Amino acid sequence: MSASDAASMTAGEPTGRGGATEPLSADSGEPTLGIRLLVADDQALVRGALIALLDLEPDLHIVAEADRGDEVLALALEHRPDVALLDVEMPGLDGIAVTAQLRAAVPSCRVLVVTTFGRPGYLKRAMAAGASGFVVKDTPARQLAETVRRVHAGLRVVDPALAAESLASGDNPLSARESDILRAAQRGGSVADIAADLFLSEGTVRNYLSSAIGKTAARSRAEAVRIAEENGWLLN
Amino acid sequence: MSASDAASMTAGEPTGRGGATEPLSADSGEPTLGIRLLVADDQALVRGALIALLDLEPDLHIVAEADRGDEVLALALEHRPDVALLDVEMPGLDGIAVTAQLRAAVPSCRVLVVTTFGRPGYLKRAMAAGASGFVVKDTPARQLAETVRRVHAGLRVVDPALAAESLASGDNPLSARESDILRAAQRGGSVADIAADLFLSEGTVRNYLSSAIGKTAARSRAEAVRIAEENGWLLN
DNA sequence: CAGTAGACGTGACAAATGTCATGCGCAATC
DNA sequence: GATTGCGCATGACATTTGTCACGTCTACTG
């Protein structure tokens, strides 16, 4: 189980969707009509299910799938999808970083970010990175295909509720270093642990924690971590 | 968006899968042959995708779907599925509690728990509650239908790697009260906050925290929370 | 019934945490 | 070229945590 299964599909798959042996479709090689799709999600079951769902649409064709962020670029270069469906939380490289990669290297490929968590910061950063759409896994399944078509047509598709929340929550107030410290604090170690992790003095760590606590309007380190997580301020 | 969309399917849907307007299948009423399935997952997109995936199998028929744990029992009583696919993390009632409900009220319905997180404690508790199978969303999609058939045939299906991990990790060492305190501590509040939440004295809270920290072999409250979360000791 | 274990409590004490003032160097900005 | 913001650091201080010893009450079990 885990990644080894799907990871093997990365190399040496000249035709069709990367290495799929599933009897989901009877594609013969690379389609030239309709919308070519790449699907990236680390959860194999979810990925497979999304593919099954999208493959029901006659105009949508899955040409590649990935279970890690750092595999997407190579697959996109090889299979030239029109739209890439990217999860945010992925091993290797997060979906937002992948979005930036794709926009730079494969400009013809539009990006639709699909995520479990409607973190306001995710939306903001995804759009800044060049994504064309952003939907949470909460949205009805029957809308997904239409969303893909809209994105392919050049429209921007964003969950309105999430967009409002994103505007309300404001920008990430944390400096890069403060985010680093909070990320290191996620595991629950002491100031000394964090300092050792980041090669800083304990005093410096305490200062950053203090200012992060202040900026997040929290009242303890743990609360600051939680708030920063919920707002999507701890990516990267 | 959110729950309101799918929640409306709970009431007044006499036939077919609970209120699905999606063009995924052309079922006519309740099938009597093959395996009747109920799918419960709070993420509409994932639920819809799973349904699309399973609906591809000619012998599997989705007869009901739910986006909340506390809706499953009523739907199962109405639609009499042979197998229920349950997510663990759901609003209303977690999948393990639902498993216990179903085993008691609808003994003919076997339960397959499908979860994002391979927490050892989840597996243990799911099996204790009467689940017939337990798979993580990491497993290849093409295996899911076969797993459903196995469960329907009365076999127990458990991810071997997870089973090993579960045995190695031992039982939940926390007393019910200690779990309560850790759960209250998840939000990141102070001792005073937790004490106020649970109507305890601050000293008592500190004592529970201290013993929980000891039992989890952690070195701080935050670490104890993290360890307990990862082991699946904070459900219920 | 005695023994045990958990829920709940108090008080005291050492260690960790969070705050604040203050400082230096560097880069961007005006 | 002065100002500003950030990274990094120190030291002092009050508060919060975590630990320990000790106690009561209740429920279960041999």
Image (cartoon, coloured by chain):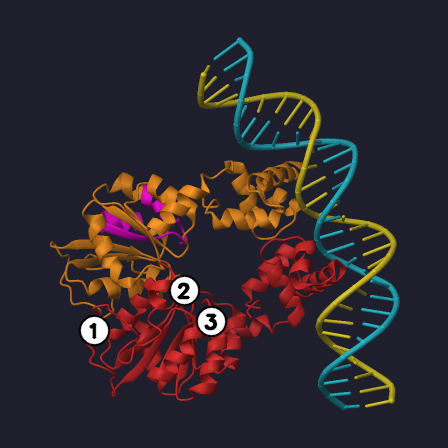
Chain colours: A orange, B red, C yellow, D cyan
Magenta stretch contains residue B161: no
Amino acid type shown at disc 2: Ser
Amino acid type shown at disc 1: Ser
Q: Which mark is residue B190?
A: none
Question: In the image, what residue occupies the spot 36% across and 60% down?
Answer: A138
Q: Which mark is residue A2?
A: 2
Question: In the image, what residue occupies the spot 30% across and 79% down?
Answer: B63
Residue A186 % position (x, y) = 56, 51
Question: In the image, what residue occupies the spot 36% across and 46% down?
Answer: A163
How far apart in space, not on screen, are marks 2 and 1 (Cα)? Answer: 31 Å
**Chain label for disc 3:** B
Q: Quadrant of the N terminus of chain A?
A: bottom left
User: Looking at the image, is B166 positioned above or below residue B185?
Assistant: below
Residue A46 % position (x, y) = 34, 64
Which residues lie in the magenta part? A72-100
Does label 1 or label 3 sit earlier along the sequence? 1
User: Looking at the image, is A176 positioned above or below residue B187?
Assistant: above
Residue A20 visible (yes or no)? no
Which residue is under mark 1? B25
Amino acid type shown at disc 3: Ala
Q: Quadrant of the C terminus of chain A?
A: top left
Count of numbered marks: 3
**Chain label for disc 1:** B
Q: Residues within 10 Å of mark 1 (few under 14, many from 20)?
A: some
Which residue is under mark 3? B161
Residues at marks 1 and 3 on the same chain: yes
Q: Residues within 10 Å of mark 2 (few under 14, many from 20)?
A: some
Left/right of residue B69 with respect to residue B125 in the rendered view: left
